[in-house]
Every structure is written in C-alpha cells, then in structure tokens.
C-alpha cells in the first residue's frame, strides 16, 4: 500500500519537487551546469562493456567506497564504474579521487520518469548501494529490470530503525530487492534482518579500508616550516555553533599557551566568510585559506575553508576535535583523524558512528567531551602533555589498522555477482 502511495505523491508532486530543486540551485546546493543529470538526463555516453553502478549519498559514503571502486576497475577486465551521489561537494571530490575507469554522475531525483531515463541510458549490470539511502523508485525500478543489487556497509541507526518500523511493509519490500545486504556493524546487521533483510551478514566495516586522506607534500612542508614550534590544535568538520565554541576555547587558552593557533576546517567550506565574521566579533584575529591570507604571528584562528584539504591539517595538528558532535547531528568519521597521528576529541552526539566511537574510547584513543568547558579542558590537557597526546595517537592508529582485511572480505562476498561480468563479452554488455 505504501509504495503505490509514494509513487502517486512523487508523481503529482512534480511541481513542488521542481520548486524545491530550483531553491537548492539558487543556494548553490545544485550544480547548474549538470542539473539535467538530476532529472535522469545523462552527462556523457555510456561506456562499452560491463558497467557497475555504485550509489552513495554524499562525501562520507562515497569516500568509503573508493577502495572498493579502485579494486573493481583494477581486477575486472573491461569494467567501468558509474558513481552517483547527490551533493555538489561530493561530486567535486569524486572528480579528484576516482580512478581511471570510474566516473561520476548526479543521482536522479526519485521520480519514476527521471529514474527510468537514467536506467534506460546507463543499463547497469550490477548495482552496489552504500549505507542507508533507500529511495523507493530507484530501488524498485532497478529490481524490475532484474539488475542485481547489493547493499554495501548498510547502516540503520536506532533512530532510523524506529522510523522504518512505522513503515514496515515498505522497507521490507525495498530490502527484499537486494540480493545481498552487508551491514556496517553487527548491530546494523541485526536491525537490517529485523526490517526484512533476512540474509543480511556482517564481514567488517568498509570504512576501515579507506586509506589516509591525501595531502600535498610540498604544501605540508611549507606549513610546517612556517608554523615552526607554535602550539596547534584543529577543529575539523565543524558545523554551525561549533566554530564559535572553538574560538572561545582559543581565547581562554591563548595566554597559557603562547603563540597558540587554532585551525578550523568547516564541513561546508562555503561558510568560511560567515565563520570568520563571527570569530572576528569575538575579538580574535582570523585568516582564511580561501582568501589567500597568510598565517601571521598575530593570527589566532585559521579558517581552512577549502575542499579536500582536511588530510593536510590533520597531519599538521596532532590534536583534533572532530565536529558535528557537540551539536546533535550524528558526528563524523573519527577514523580519518585516527590514521593521521591525531589524539581525538569528540562530543557526545556520535550516533552515526557508534561502533567506531566506542572502540576508540575503549582503546583509550579518544576523549569524549560534553560541552565547551570540557573541550577546553581536553585541549589544554593534550597541549600540556605531549606524551599523552602521543600515546592516544598510537592507540588510534592501531585501532584504525584493526580491520585491514575488510576489503578482501567484502570483495569475496561480491564474487558471485562479479564473475558473470568477467565473462561477459564487452561487445554485448548492457544489452
């Protein structure tokens, strides 16, 4: 009953959806040059040969798929990988990081005509769906064409589990469309089973297979030389409210730690100007990376409002508060900091990464703080005690390496779906 109702609403709601997309485009949330892709109109020709379609919601999910995508194009002769996401920032990142043989398109909005145009053009041979975006029309139209579907690193938070239980028939039908469901954690796997993915299994968290975030070596050396011995800490992937907290912490600590520099890397770089204005109002001196500002001796806060440079600043900092966690938004992936020699501090709101968070805390590799006052205490403790910082960083790195074999395990589960592609005559692919 729910699926026909959803289809009806998504059909008659076309004008409202169009208005919503127009507003997003006006706010820079949609790519005007490639907007047709959101309507299912392709931005390029379909490559010949077998095509694997991978879908991820945004940056975090798409990054977790990169090691798998690299292996697919390396080990399966003649295969191409289509990667879809729904955000401008993820599209830019994928353009930089996708290997040869893989390419990006925006996912079509979940209206039947858009989805059918998309599938008519790309004719994928296999679909790999990441984490937790269950768009009913995309899934059911793909299943109707008998295209095998696999859920990779499937995630069902307790909150979304409770929500989906109210629509049990719909989520059961959607999950039954997947030929295989691989949960991100044991808990996610259990929730997937209870919602209808009877054969769901856990073989490891693919986020552990993601290599360290990249950094420009020349730029790293330049920053290290310019900063010298200045004490430094990083507020990474921050969201509104957290930047001011970090700035106030800096203001209270700067007397105790002479020359202290606080680096803020906002999750959304387009907020850089707004953040700088707010921090200036606190009486602090701010430099912005996107504006080409230098870090002077009097710079209190450096706002690194660029895309794709978080790896650079993790390598510089050594102490990292990971944002989206002092505001109730679910947190960010702590493994990115763990792989780059950082002692990790995070807030209490880590529901999107519960398993990783608990494992880091149990290993003594992170500090959970409840509020701004506790953030100040944690940063002060780590700045004052380099040996404690080093101990935490070593423990974090060891945990990040704990599931080094997860990519092999996931790839082994995919073999029954990949073997037909290896045998497929490229001249007849997609027909």
Image (spheres, rainbow, N blue to C red):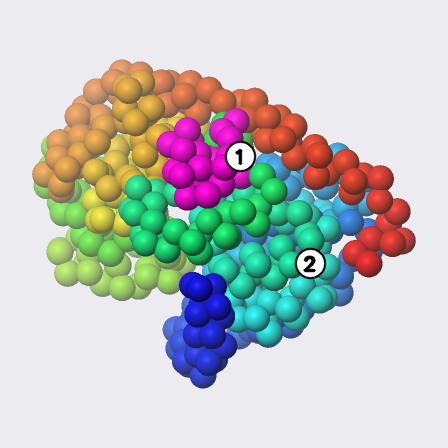
Seen as rendered, the residue at the extreme bottom is 15
Q: What residue is rendered at 82% in x and 58% in y?
A: 431
Seen as rendered, the residue at the extreme front is 1
Q: In the figure, residue 409 lies in which quadrant?
A: top right
Place of residue 194 in the rendered image (x, y in percent of width and height, measured from the top left): 40, 39
Place of residue 251 in the rendered image (x, y in percent of width and height, measured from the top left): 13, 45
Q: Which dot marks residue 145?
A: 2
Q: CA distance from mark 1 to mark 2?
A: 22 Å
Q: Earlier in the sequence, mark 1 or mark 2?
A: 2
Task: Evaluate whether residue 267 shows in this view.
Answer: no
- Side (left or right) of 240 relative to 355: left
**Total numbered circles:** 2
Q: Is residue 243 above or below residue 109?
A: above
Residue labelled with disc 1? 199
Residue 182 highlighted magenta (yes or no): yes
Task: Evaluate whether residue 346 shows in this view.
Answer: yes
Q: Which residues are magenta?
A: 181-203
- Label 2: element kind: loop
Q: What residue is rendered at 30% in x and 42% in y?
A: 158
Place of residue 368 in the rendered image (x, y in percent of width and height, measured from the top left): 21, 31
Q: Which residue is nearer to you in this view: 309 or 207?
A: 207
Rendered-image quadrant of the N terminus: bottom left
Residue 293 highlighted magenta (yes or no): no
Q: Which residue is nearer to you in this view: 49 or 218?
A: 49
Q: Is residue 211 above or below residue 238?
A: above
Q: Which residue is nearer to you in this view: 381 or 103?
A: 103
- Label 1: element kind: loop
Place of residue 381 in the rendered image (x, y in percent of width and height, measured from the top left): 17, 26
């Amino acid at each position: 009953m729910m699926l026909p109702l959803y289809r009806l609403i998504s059909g008659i709601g076309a004008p409202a959806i169009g208005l919503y997309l127009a507003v997003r485009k006006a706010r820079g949330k949609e790519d005007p040059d490639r907007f047709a892709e959101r309507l299912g109109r392709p931005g390029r020709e379909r490559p010949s040969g077998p095509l694997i379609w991978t879908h991820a919601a945004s940056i975090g999910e798409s990054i977790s798929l990169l090691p798998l995508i690299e292996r697919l194009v390396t080990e399966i002769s003649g295969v191409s990988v289509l990667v879809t996401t729904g955000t401008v920032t993820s599209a830019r990142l994928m353009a930089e990081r996708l290997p040869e043989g893989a390419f990006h398109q925006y996912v079509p909005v979940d209206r039947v005509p858009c989805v059918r145009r998309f599938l008519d053009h790309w004719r994928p041979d296999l679909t790999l769906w990441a984490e937790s975006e269950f768009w009913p029309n995309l899934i059911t139209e793909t299943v109707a064409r008998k295209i095998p579907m696999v859920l990779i690193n499937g995630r069902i938070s307790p909150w979304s589990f409770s929500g989906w239980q109210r629509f049990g028939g719909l989520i059961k039908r959607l999950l039954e469309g997947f030929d295989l469901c691989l949960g991100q954690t044991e808990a996610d796997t259990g929730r997937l089973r209870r919602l209808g993915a009877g054969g769901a299994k856990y073989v490891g968290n693919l986020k552990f297979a993601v290599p360290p975030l990249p950094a420009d070596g020349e730029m790293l050396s330049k920053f290290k030389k310019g900063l010298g011995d200045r004490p430094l800490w990083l507020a990474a992937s921050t969201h509104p409210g957290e930047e001011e907290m970090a700035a106030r912490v800096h203001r209270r600590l700067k007397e105790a730690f002479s020359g202290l520099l606080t680096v803020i890397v906002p999750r959304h770089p387009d907020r850089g100007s707004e953040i700088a204005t707010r921090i200036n109002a606190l009486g602090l001196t701010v430099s912005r990376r996107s504006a080409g500002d230098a870090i002077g001796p009097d710079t209190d806060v450096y706002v690194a409002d660029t895309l794709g440079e978080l790896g650079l600043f993790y390598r510089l900092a050594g102490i990292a508060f990971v944002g989206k966690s002092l505001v109730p938004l679910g947190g960010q992936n702590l493994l990115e900091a763990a792989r780059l020699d950082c002692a990790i501090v995070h807030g209490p709101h880590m529901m999107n990464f519960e398993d990783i968070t608990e494992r880091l805390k149990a290993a003594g590799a992170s500090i959970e703080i409840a509020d701004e006052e506790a953030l100040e205490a944690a940063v002060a403790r780590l700045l004052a005690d380099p040996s404690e910082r080093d101990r935490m960083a070593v423990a974090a790195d060891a945990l990040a390496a704990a599931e080094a074999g997860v990519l092999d395990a996931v790839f082994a589960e995919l073999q029954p779906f990949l073997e037909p592609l290896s045998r497929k005559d490229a001249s007849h692919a997609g027909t």
